[in-house]
Amino acid sequence: MRPRVLPRKEVLRMRGDQMPQGRAGKLRLDFNENTVGCSPAVRAALRKLSREQIAVYPEYEATRRRMAQYFGVSPAETILNNGVDDSLKLIFDCFVEPRASVFLVEPTFDMYRLYAALHGARVLTEQLDAQMCFPLDKVVRALRKLKPRIFLLANPNNPTGTLLGRRELRTILDAAPRTLVVVDEAYAEFSGVTVLPWIRRSPNLVVTRTFSKVAGLAGLRFGCLFANRHLIAEMRKAQPPFPVNTPALVAAEAAIRDAAYLRRTVAEVHRGKRVLEAALERLGVRFFPSGGNFLLADFGARAPALLRALAGQGILLRDRTRDFGRAGFIRITIGTRPQMRRLVRALEAQC
Ligand SMILES: Cc1ncc(COP(=O)(O)O)c(C=O)c1O
């Protein structure tokens, strides 16, 4: 029987993407996760969780203090949550009324459009150019003219890897005094570029961080949102009382205590990236410079067959056809050097 009460029209219009299943045990180069896993110290901390710790509702203040200290901000400037997707939900819940304008430079992270659609926002866009470079002048002009409610910017950008430097980010903030500028720094550990210290002098800046990427906690869902303390105080009112589960808190704390593991992961990803870049150059495959733990490459007409062949060998890559309106673009997560060599052998056999 069909229900008589239906969800809002914004929900009915949505596409409802299914995420792929059965990825465990394969070479997962499709979702920009940590391809090795979290620090062993995280697993050790999780094993020590007591029955009582699991039975009681979580407490947040100690973890908030330690996260704030780790990221060099104050607890009053910090919100703990389930990662960037959850940060985006909070941002939209707090700032985006129906018909409010949301400005994006596309292609970018899919979730920005999903939340904009869900909130009935108007999406204003500029496009990256054919080299995947950021159109700074156009963006500045649009920010000044259109004064959008929020501007969402992934830096580095997913799926292209495009990275803006501090000077460009300053220019953007200066052009948008009445816009909430959200800088999604999901991959900042790999790029080394962050505007997190600017939350004190830029009252409309929100910075999001995640433990899904370098820290290898995607399965636990943990992240932080940082902003001016007045914004944080307001946004916390819109969070549920227990937004993060206890294992995620315990794991995230153990992850930042093992900073050496995070540093080694970043260094190995940089080495793995060089292995892959050299191979793509040899094979004559066009790719774009990336600030993240992934690369976007254009395999042209061979892309669909390549994706199928590699999937058959247990190597998962991400087809980005949807972003560009034609087949060819594949996003590849960077793993360790041995993982990249395995990928390169498979690519060489196909290309
Ligand atoms: C730019 C960007 N932001 C956020 C996320 C998701 O982060 P989280 O796992 O913390 O929700 C991703 C994941 O692919 C991403 O590419």
Image (cartoon, grey):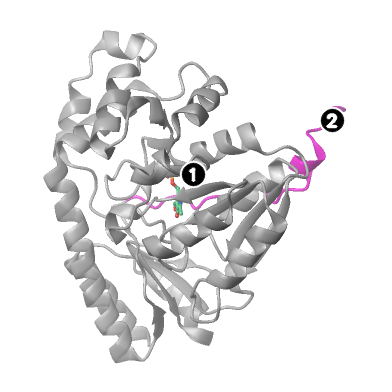
Residue 58, label in figure: none
Ligand 1 lies under 8 Å from the Cβ of mark 1: no
Dividing the image into 4 quarters, which one contains the N terminus? top right
| Residue 19 lies in the magenta-colored region | yes
Q: Above or below — where is 304 with respect to 336? A: below
Q: Residue furthest right?
A: 4
**Which residue was labeled with disc 1?**
205
The Cα atoms of the two marked residues, 2 and 1, are separated by 48 Å
Q: Main secondary structure of the magenta part?
A: loop
Q: Residue at x 45, y 50 (%)?
A: 184
Q: Please, what is the three-letter code of the amino acid marked with disc 2?
A: Met
Q: Give percent across and percent down for residue 250.
A: 26, 26
| Residue 183 lies in the magenta-colored region | no
Q: Give percent across and percent down for residue 199.
A: 41, 41
Residue 1, label in figure: 2
**Is residue 223 in view?**
yes
Q: Foreground: 331 or 348? A: 331
Q: Foreground: 178 or 234? A: 178
Q: Above or below — where is 26 with respect to 88? A: below
Contact between marks 2 and 1 (CB within 8 A): the answer is no
Which residues make up the magenta segment? 1-24
338 lies left or right of 122? left
Q: Foreground: 9 or 129? A: 129
Disc 1 secondary structure class: strand
Q: Residue at x 54, y 27 (%)?
A: 235
Q: Above or below — where is 58 with respect to 153? A: above
Q: Residue at x 38, y 68 (%)?
A: 332
Occupied quadrant, residue 145 = bottom right
How many discs appear? 2
Dividing the image into 4 quarters, which one contains the C terminus? bottom left
Q: Give percent across and percent down for residue 36.
A: 23, 52
Ligand 1 lies under 8 Å from the Cβ of mark 2: no
